């Protein structure tokens, strides 16, 4: 196992203005580079002040630009306007609602993502009429043979310390890992498990939301981790465990989050590796991008059709944008590091997220998208917002062919 990319120990950010500028420049240059291979784009400043008139024909020359979305709006006639910004300037793009597919795609475009647009500039030189929108996306590729063997178990949102933590189901899960299940099939599968990845919210934490104390059984966050560590000591030592933090964990809330501190790590067994959120990890030649998934809340709120019930759909929106948290300044508080750790490059074999407590599995162009569920039953807050969690269900991924088996531990 090797950690390929992780903020831990590399944070340089102090939150100065220039650092934000640098952060967005890195995001733009890396995402625009991906698109640039596919269209011949010119700098936005070269569009300014001139319409493209050829032989009196209206807007006949097609040109392309690549920009970060700085604004989206709908005109009184129901057309869509997307403002794009590159390092040289900004320009509005109009998408007409008569062009069905294009308009549908345009309505899914959100703030701060980087897209390419092909179209013609109007005669007065003030607006581009789009004919094509290009997201960075991933290339089509042939099915990869990994050569790896065994299984990786993907979980998240354990929430140890919460009154809703489902300890019985969790202990059943530990029994499975130990090879102590009643069923022979599960015993056989347990033998093949080589990795366990935890994508954040290992404990419930304290002071995460108002009145949280009323829903806690362990009130001290270090006690919560001590309890969690006890569970992990029970897991057989041949299973490599990778733990990445989430918004309930005891590290800074701004993302990328570093790995849990030594004071917490010291309680855990030696087969646990602590990484940051997000991080890219290699498991015997299979690359897995681990991200807690706070941005899913933003994607559900802003992309039509994306819902908590099918969280892998949100991960699909991430990979199309080649970015784990495209929207800046909403639910995810992004720390302006020199490098944008949220850019999805290289394309991993697996993207593993959590956070929304529902389970989802999708395959997209040879990338396996998995949102693992939770070990926490519905909380008071989730009841109020009608969030139905899918607890105690565990996706187990085969490292050789990426086949997924869902195991249930709540019976
Ligand atoms: O988040 C679990 C899910 O519940 C996730 O979709 C966010 C949502 N959630 C939880 N608490 C809140 C508050 N206070 N406001 C809005 N949405 C919330 P988790 O990270 O496990 O708490
Ligand atoms: Fe959670
Ligand atoms: Zn969370």
Image (cartoon, rainbow, N blue to C red):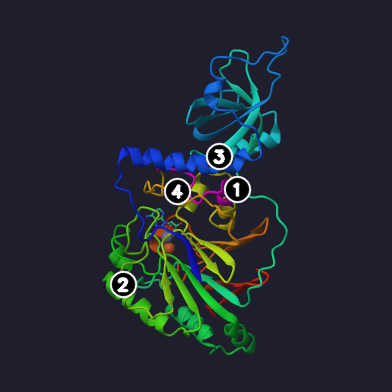
Q: Are marks 2 and 3 in contact (CB under 8 Å)?
A: no
**Gap in Å between the C-alphas at discs 2 and 3?**
40 Å
Q: What secondary structure prevails in the magenta region? A: loop
| Residue 53 x, y percent position in the rendering | 67, 13
Along the viewing direction, whichever of 282 and 360 lies nearer the viewer: 282
Instruction: Specify the farthest residue to the top.
Output: 56
**Gap in Å between the C-alphas at discs 3 and 1?**
13 Å
Label 2 sits on a secondary structure element that is: helix
Q: Residue at x 73, y 10 (%)?
A: 55
Q: Is residue 338 left or right of residue 280?
A: left
- Say if the magenta span includes residue 321: yes
Q: Which mark is residue 264?
A: 2
Name the residue beneath numbered marker 3.
32
| Residue 196 x, y percent position in the rendering | 50, 74
Q: Earlier in the sequence, mark 3 or mark 4?
A: 3
Name the residue beneath numbered marker 1.
320
Q: Count residues near mark 2 (Cα–Cα under 10 Å), then give few for <14, some for 14-19, many for 20+.
A: some
Name the residue beneath numbered marker 4.
340
In front: mark 4 or mark 2?
A: 4
**Quarter of the image where the C terminus is located:** bottom right
- Say if the magenta span includes residue 307: no
């Amino acid at each position: 196992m090797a950690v390929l990319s992780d903020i831990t120990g590399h944070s340089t950010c102090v939150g100065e203005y220039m650092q934000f500028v640098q952060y967005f420049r890195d995001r733009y240059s890396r995402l625009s580079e991906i698109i640039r291979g596919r269209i011949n784009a010119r700098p936005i400043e070269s569009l300014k002040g001139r319409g493209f008139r050829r032989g009196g024909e209206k807007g006949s020359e097609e040109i392309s630009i690549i920009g970060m979305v700085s604004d989206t709006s709908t005109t009184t006639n129901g057309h869509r306007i997307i403002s794009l910004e590159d390092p040289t300037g900004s320009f509005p793009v109009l998408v007409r609602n008569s062009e069905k597919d294009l308009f549908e795609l345009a309505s899914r475009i959100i703030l701060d993502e980087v897209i390419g647009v092909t179209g013609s500039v109007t005669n007065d030189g003030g607006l581009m009429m789009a004919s094509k929108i290009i997201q960075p996306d991933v290339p089509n590729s042939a099915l990869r043979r990994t050569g790896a063997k065994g299984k990786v178990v993907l979980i998240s949102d354990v929430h140890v310390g919460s009154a809703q933590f489902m300890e019985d189901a969790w202990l059943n899960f530990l029994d499975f890992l130990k090879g102590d299940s009643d069923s022979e099939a599960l015993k056989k599968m347990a033998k093949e498990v080589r990795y366990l990845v935890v994508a954040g919210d290992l404990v419930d934490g304290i002071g995460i939301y108002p009145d949280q104390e009323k829903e806690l059984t362990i009130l001290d966050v270090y006690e919560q981790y001590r309890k969690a560590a006890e569970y992990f000591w029970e897991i057989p030592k041949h299973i490599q465990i990778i733990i990445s933090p989430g918004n309930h964990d005891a590290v800074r809330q701004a993302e990328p989050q570093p790995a849990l501190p030594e004071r917490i790590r010291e309680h855990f067994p030696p087969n646990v590796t602590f990484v940051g959120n997000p991080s890219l990890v290699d498991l015997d030649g299979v690359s897995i991008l681990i991200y807690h998934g706070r941005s899913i809340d933003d994607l559900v709120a802003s992309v039509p059709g994306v819902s908590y019930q099918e969280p892998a759909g949100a991960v699909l929106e991430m990979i199309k944008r080649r970015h784990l948290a495209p929207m800046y300044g909403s639910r995810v508080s992004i720390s302006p590091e020199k490098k944008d750790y949220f850019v999805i490059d290289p394309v991993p074999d697996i993207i593993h997220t959590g956070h929304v407590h529902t389970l989802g599995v999708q395959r997209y162009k040879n990338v396996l998208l998995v949102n693992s569920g939770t070990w926490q039953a519905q909380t008071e807050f989730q009841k109020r917002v009608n969030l139905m969690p899918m607890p105690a269900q565990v996706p187990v991924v085969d490292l050789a062919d990426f086949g997924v088996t869902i195991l249930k531990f709540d019976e």
